[in-house]
Image (spheres, rainbow, N blue to C red):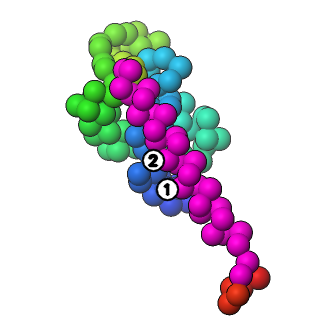
Amino acid sequence: MARSEKANLLQGTLDMLILRSLQSGKKHGYQITRWLDTTSENAILVEEGSLYPALHRMERRGWIESDWGRSESNRRAKFYKLTASGRSQLKKEITEWESLSSAISLILTTRGVGLEP
């Protein structure tokens, strides 16, 4: 599967993935994308054009907070961290994702009348 096709899998899950990346502590945008890329074994690529609008949206919703600081390369960077509301939202989204993925798994593995083996 090409990288562009993999990116399409993120629709509807990007907020959950970003929130999960912040669960272990504050990160700036590049750290978030690197964490997602590394943790997914290079299967998930989040472009800046998707990441920053999502971060701003989540900040408006109160799920994350930001402040300015210095990156590991001593550059000025905006760091994001989870709020209590964000931790609650992450829990909700994980529960919904697990339910949906279980339902999809049932559909993909069910053999029934009129179905191809």
Q: Residues within 10 Å of mark 2 (few under 14, many from 20)?
A: few
Q: Residue furthest front?
A: 113
Mark 1 vs mark 2: in front: 2
The reply to whether dot 1 and dot 2 touch (C-beta < 8 Å) is yes
- Quadrant (top left/top right/bottom left/bottom right) for the N terminus: bottom right
Q: Above or below — where is 14 with respect to 75?
A: below
The majority secondary structure of the magenta stretch comes to helix
Relative placement, left or right, of 20 versus 39 is: left
Instruction: Note whether residue 114 is visible.
Output: yes
Specify the segment rendered in magenta: 83-112
Q: Which residue is mark 1?
A: 9
Q: Which residue is mark 2?
A: 13
- Classify mark 2: helix, strand or loop: loop
Q: Quadrant of residue 27?
A: top left
Question: Camera-side residue: 75 or 38?
Answer: 38
Question: Camera-side residue: 12 or 1?
Answer: 12
